[in-house]
Amino acid sequence: MVFLSNPQVWHLPGTWSEQPINGSYLGLTSSQLSWLAASLLVTLLIAFSVYILEISNSKRKRSN
């Protein structure tokens, strides 16, 4: 669909250029992006820890 747009996206200024994007790409400041990444990482670590604990508890119950 991008290639069928009118005007073509590659003719618009600032698109498909090799220059870096000035400003925030995601609409977040660097501190907001850091907080987002940290909160996602902590959530994944907690979920993984709970999973490991459940696996070890189930193995312990089977061995008894």
Image (cartoon, helix red, strand yellow):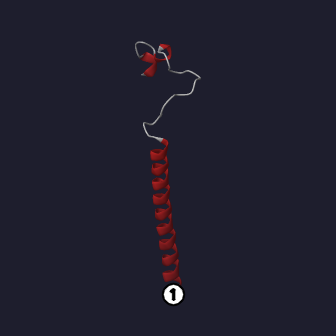
Q: Can you say whether 1 is above or below 50 in the image?
A: above
**Residue located at (46% from left, 51% from top):** 35
Q: Nearer the viewer, residue 8 or 26?
A: 26
Determine whether the residue tagged by mark 1 lies in a helix, strand or loop. Answer: loop
Q: Nearer the viewer, residue 16 or 64?
A: 16
Could you tell me residue 34's position as x and y percent?
Answer: 49, 48
Q: Residues within 10 Å of mark 1 (few under 14, many from 20)?
A: few
Q: As drawn, which residue projects farthest toward the bottom? A: 64
Q: Return the x and y of residue 45 as percentages of the image width and height.
A: 50, 61
Q: Which residue is mark 1?
A: 64
State which quarter of the image contains the N terminus: top left
**Residue 2 appears in which quarter of the rendering?**
top left
Q: Amino acid type of disc 1?
A: Asn
> Which residue occupies the extreme left position in the image?
6
Looking at this view, name the residue that lies furthest to the right: 18
Residue drawn 52% across and 28% down? Answer: 21
The residue located at (50%, 67%) in the rendering is 49
Above or below residue 28? Residue 7 is: above
Residue 11: horizontal and vertical position, in percent?
A: 49, 13
Nearest to the observer: residue 45 or residue 23: 23
Q: Is residue 59 above or below residue 8?
A: below
Count how many numbered circles sit on residues in the image: 1
